[in-house]
Image (spheres, rainbow, N blue to C red):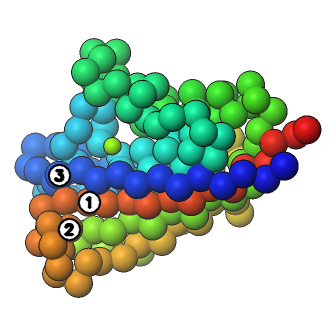
Amino acid sequence: MLRIGEGWDSHRLVEGRALRIACVEIPFERGSLGHSDGDAAAHAACDALLGALALGDIGSHFPPGDPRWEGVDSRVFLAKVVSMLADRHANLVNIDITVIVESPRLAPFICDMRAAMAEALGCDVERVSIKAKSAEGLGAVGEGAAIEARAVALVHVAE
Ligand code: MG
């Protein structure tokens, strides 16, 4: 059986924080504000995978108020979500992630991001798509105050 899931995440961009996107640290003067490492792409991916199996969302499994997740590398979340899928005999078919940020330009990092996400998800890089867009100056993302990420994942469940 095939199941599909969708995920979305957004974080404020502030000074004094690292900018991690899809498990890659991007050199930039601001970074994502969040309880964990604030990796919006990784969080959207987690929600897409959880959504595919109707397993709730990232906040229900890794509550932001829980000190265990403070400053945690989002690869920990991805690994736990993948293991939840494996427990249910489910495997990722493919995931398509869109990152929306006004700056920096992400094109030079797409290959590294795909490789890093594939490693975190334990799958071939061909199964991971990452696209980057700007918001054309519109809204909080367009003003550079936030980063947003969306993900759609297809999951195969053995019957
Ligand atoms: Mg998040």
Instruction: Report whether 12 appears left or right of 108.
Output: left
How far apart in space, not on screen, are marks 2 and 3 (Cα)?
A: 9 Å
Checking the image for residue 147, the label placed there is: 1
Q: In which quarter of the image is residue 80?
A: top right
In the displayed structure, would residue 141 be above or below residue 55? below
Which sits in the foreground, 123 or 82?
Answer: 82
Percent x, y of residue 61: 46, 25
Amino acid on which disc 3 is placed:
Arg
Checking the image for residue 141, the label placed there is: 2
Q: Residue placed at 81% from the left, 33% from the top?
A: 89
Answer with mark 3 or mark 1, whichever residue precedes in sequence: 3
Which sits in the foreground, 154 or 21?
Answer: 154
Answer with mark 2 or mark 3, whichever residue precedes in sequence: 3
Amino acid on which disc 1 is placed:
Ile
Q: Residue furthest right?
A: 159
Q: Residue placed at 64% from the left, 35% from the top?
A: 82
Which sits in the foreground, 62 or 60?
Answer: 60
Q: In which quarter of the image is the C terminus?
A: top right
Q: Mark 3 points at which residue?
A: 12
Asked if marks 3 and 1 touch (Cβ < 8 Å), the reply is no
Asked if marks 2 and 3 touch (Cβ < 8 Å), the reply is no
On whether ligand 1 comes within 8 Å of the CB at mark 1, the answer is no
Q: Which residue lies furthest to the bottom in this view?
A: 136
Q: Residues within 10 Å of mark 2 (few under 14, many from 20)?
A: many
Answer with mark 1 or mark 2, whichever residue precedes in sequence: 2
